[in-house]
Amino acid sequence: MSGFVLTYFPLRGRGEPIRLILADNGAKWTEDVIQLPDWFGGKCPLKKEAVFGQLPQFSDGDFVLYQSNTILRYLGRKFGVAGSKDQEVAVIDMINDGVEDLRLKYSRFMFSEFETGKEKYEKDLPNQLSAFERILSKNSNGTKFLVGDKISYADYNLLDILHCHLNIFPDCLSSFPLLTAYKARISSRSNLSEYLNSEDCKSRPFFPKRG
């Protein structure tokens, strides 16, 4: 697999689940880093070329995609981690939509409510996480993946949003034994562990610095 280019900001953000699926599947890729002041200051021509004026952009040779979840699904199919039966594909897609819902709440909190709504967000977080704990419990008693016996693109997306929350609320999984074990189990996969412990990953911030 060659010719992969991820164009994104110098952040984890919506680029990170894409990096996780690439790393775990042994793919090499190039990072095309766009600086935030250039993007929001109108100094980046790509902003006008991007289909929806947003990043990340992902290139597979001459084929270019936007929208992070679309990129995830594309790579899921490419690497054979998007489900093997129609119903399994649908459930993976459903769970990934659930992760997206949580990511949107997280982003709104980080951008708009961090100073004023942190206590409220933390209090409500168990209600958000409990859905994923239940999902895990219904698949081999939580000892494998979100769906079936094989990792899927939704697992990479969930792993990242768990990391995002643990970065702010280190104890947020304390009452979720299945999610705690799941995070440790997925993170310990050989290729993922190597990436997660790399300097590139560790030095990349979760979120832009606050003014």
Image: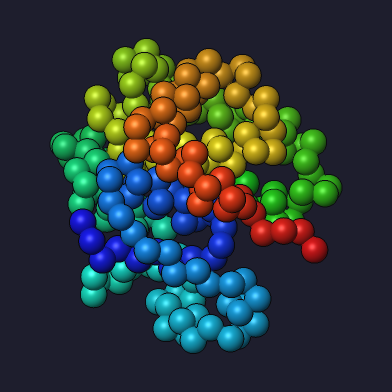
> Residue shown at 42%/83% (left/top)?
49
Give the percent coordinates (x, y) of residue 66: 38, 67
Compare residues 32 and 163 and report the one nearer the observer.
Answer: 32
Q: Quadrant of residue 210?
A: bottom right
> Residue shown at 56%/45% (left/top)?
202
Please say which color scheme the image uses.
rainbow
Compare residues 90 and 74 and report the one nearer the observer.
Answer: 74
Which residue is situated farthest in the left direction here? Answer: 85
Eyeballing the image, is 96 above or below 50?
Answer: above
Eyeballing the image, is 101 above or below 144?
Answer: below
- The answer to whether residue 102 of the structure is visible from this angle is no
Q: Which quadrant is the C terminus positioned in?
A: bottom right
Q: Quadrant of residue 13?
A: bottom right
> Residue shown at 61%/28% (left/top)?
127
Compare residues 126 and 184 and report the one nearer the observer.
Answer: 184
Give the percent coordinates (x, y) of residue 34: 53, 72
Q: Which quadrant is the N terminus positioned in?
A: bottom left
Q: Using residue 136 as the reference point, say whether residue 160 is left or right of it.
A: right
Q: Using residue 158 as the reference point, say whether residue 114 is left or right of it.
A: right
Give the percent coordinates (x, y) of residue 159: 47, 36
Q: Using residue 174 as the reference point, say whether residue 145 is left or right of it.
A: left
Which residue is situated farthest in the front direction here? Answer: 199
Give the percent coordinates (x, y) of residue 41: 65, 82
Compare residues 9 and 173 and report the one nearer the observer.
Answer: 9
Eyeballing the image, is 162 above or below 55?
Answer: above
Which residue is situated farthest in the top direction here? Answer: 141
- The answer to whether residue 47 of the structure is visible from this angle is yes
> Residue shown at 61%/79% (left/top)?
38
Q: How many marks?
A: 0
